[in-house]
Amino acid sequence: MKIRFLGAIRKVTGSCYHLIYRDTELLVDCGMHQGKDADALNRMPFNFNPEHIDYLIVTHAHLDHSGLIPKLVADGFRGRILATEATADLLEIMLLDSAHIQEKDAEWMTKKSFRAGKDIVYEPLYTGEDVLRALPFIDRKKYGEREEIIEGLSYRFLDAGHILGSAILEIFFDENNKEKKIVFSGDVGKSNNPIINDPTRIEQADYVIVESTYGNRLHKGMEESIEELAEAIDKTFKRGGNVLIPAFAVGRTQDIIYILKKFITEGRFKHLNVFIDSPLADRATKIYLSHPELFDLEAKDFFKLKDKDGLQLNFTVTVEESQKINKIKSGVIIIAGSGMCEGGRIRHHFKHNIWRPECSIIFSGFQAKGTLGRYIVDGAKSAHILGEEIAIRAKVYTIGGFSAHADQKELLNWIGSFKNNPEIFVVHGEEDVELIFAKVINERLGLKTHVPFINDELEF
């Protein structure tokens, strides 16, 4: 078995691993790069031949793990794409949304070029048609069922507790008549996350490729974070402002809706007027509700309750509906993408609210280096948004307890479940975080750790 580390290496985005076993080639994830230089990186040729890849195994639907699938197919991939059932459902809407954004961005940049007299035609990375050509390659799989790929090579999905359908991937392979196992953590969820189950604990592996997004820090507790959210909303409304929450359409938006609904049922607020300004979040929420078998016990019981009149959820789909929100000057919660503020409708809401000191911005998810979200979180006084330099006077909150990623303690607990001292490969983190976390694993758990470089190749 050979493995090459091709993406999310000493950075968070662009997950991709290339495995070769005998004459069979696999990819684990095929994710987009996000943040600085993302467009150039996403347009680079793959450093493998897509025509030679027999299987792509997708750990979950977030674009940093799946977003280059249409490009892979357009470049010649004709194998099978293996994903859990919920991931397969989410991939369709997320990839189509990604294509739509890229098509619109290319159209806007082309118009801008022509206005400047440069006559440059910009092409999207891929189109909606490319996505539709890729979808038939997806095979829907269940959690917990071990399936053979070829003789001596099999895999199994286990619940990662990150977003709906997210998976830890076990790869089993024969080596000199002895079975060995590689575990890809995917993105490990927090314990006690709203709605979905906790990450599956595993006791045996020979090699573990583990994410480290928050490998250098601890999250606030969930209850503390819920209290902070309630307090931020209350103070903002008393100041006469709006609450803006940049949120990932898949996972975070549904968690926040769940928490806001609990605020009403528990009597914390009598009324909340909430705008979910994301067509993708609307579609994703419907997919969530179509998979109650993946909810934890508390969520299963909670969603049986009838909606209280006090929670007014407004899913806005059209541009006209979105624009009307900006006429509302106070008393509403606006949840919109993108989660890192790199695109989407949140930037329009920033333009109308971020300069107002009575408003608040609540960040509830990871903000990668080079993104607008990270720039704001790091204390910027102004930002270039939609062609204007706009002052940042709104109150900025960062509530880490809502993260869908395990923190350092939870990652250590997950790794500590392995009883046979596997070798650990730390990935999917900013470089300094990966190095810190690898050292912590070695010191506290006594395990051999590695922090691979991009294109490193190992043979097991």
Image: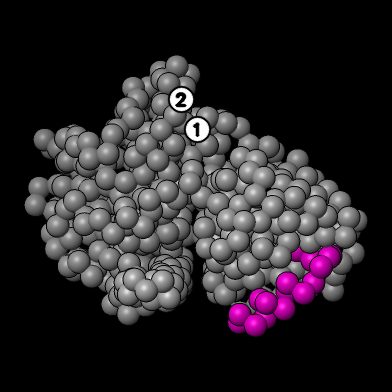
Expressed as whole percent of the image width and height from the top left, the position of residue 113 reads 39, 71
The answer to whether 371 is drawn above or below residue 124 in the figure is above
Q: Residue tagged by mark 2?
A: 436
Q: How is the image coloured?
A: one colour
Q: Counting other residues with Cα less than 10 Å from the Cα at mark 2, is it few (<14), some (14-19), or many (20 or more)?
A: some
At a point 78% along the width and 45% down the height, the residue shown is: 228
In the foreground, 116 or 369: 116
Residue neighbourhood size for the residue with mark 1, other residues' Cα within 10 Å, grouped as few (<14), some (14–19), many (≥20): many
- Does residue 211 belong to the magenta stretch? no
Disc 2 to disc 1: CB gap under 8 Å:
yes
Q: Position of residue 357 (x, y in %)?
A: 80, 52
Above or below residue 319? Residue 274 is: above
Q: Residue 284's spot in the image, x, y percent?
A: 55, 69
How many dots with numbers? 2
Q: Is residue 55 visible?
A: yes
Of pointers 2 and 1, the one earlier in the residue sequence: 1
Measure the alpha-carbon separation of dots 2 and 1. 7 Å
Q: Is residue 319 magenta?
A: yes
Looking at this view, is 395 or 221 the one in front? 395
Horizontal side of residue 7 vs 174, given as left or right: right
Residue under circle 1?
215
* On-image quarter of the N terminus: top left
Task: Kindly identify the amino acid type of the residue bearing the numbered disc 1.
Answer: Gly
Q: Residue at x 56, y 63 (%)?
A: 387
Question: Foreground residue, 126 or 66?
Answer: 126
Q: Which element type, helix, strand or loop, lies under badge 2?
A: helix
| Residue 146 visible from this viewpoint | no
Query: Residue 174, image x and y in percent?
Result: 17, 41
In the image, taking residue 153 as reference, residue 294 lies left or right, namely right
| Magenta range | 318-333
Q: Circle 1 — which element? A: loop
Q: Where 83 sits versus 368, above or below?
A: below
